[in-house]
Image: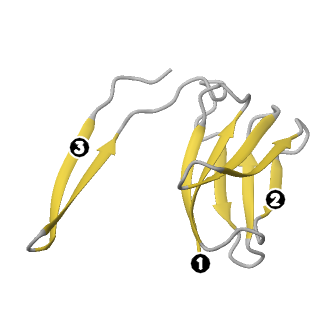
Amino acid sequence: MLRKHNYISTRVLLLPLVTLMLFLTTAKAEGLFPSSQTNSVDVYIDAYTGELVVNNKVSSVYEVRIFDLTGKEVMKATQPQSDLNSRLDISGLSKGLYLVRVSPTPDAPALTIKIMLR
């Protein structure tokens, strides 16, 4: 369930003919993991190994899905309840921007972040 959206917008003039409009939101997803657990999931790329690391601080089964910017699912992994620190080999993905979605079930509210592979 999403809380009320609070949007902040700003305009940046890049060139005389190009204006970039940025929107930031302060909405937070509820229900991903128990509300008593704050910051229950950390997702980052290990710079040394190049793997995607998911640290789950809550003991529950969760699913990690990676999408390219066209919305195509390029990777999917289900992490068992006992695996609180998992590593996904993303070396097969080409360079670019991807969306990583972490959720306890496919249709539940999820944590979604952007990653860039160089």
> Mark 3 belongs to which amino acid?
Ile
Of the pair 60 and 110, the residue shown nearer to us: 110
Colour mapping used in the image: secondary structure
Residue at image mark 3: 8
Q: Earlier in the sequence, mark 1 or mark 3?
A: 3
Residue 31 sits above or below residue 42 on the image:
above
Residue at left 34%, top 23%? 4
Residue at image mark 2: 87
Residue at image mark 1: 118
> Mark 2 belongs to which amino acid?
Arg
In the picture, residue 80 is in which quadrant? Answer: top right
Residue 49 sits above or below residue 74 on the image:
below
Mark 3 is surrounded, within 10 Å at the Cα level, by few (under 14), some (14 to 19) or many (20 or more) other residues, namely few
Q: Position of residue 87 (x, y in %)?
A: 81, 59
Quarter the C terminus occupies: bottom right
Mark 2 is surrounded, within 10 Å at the Cα level, by few (under 14), some (14 to 19) or many (20 or more) other residues, namely some
Q: Earlier in the sequence, mark 2 or mark 3?
A: 3
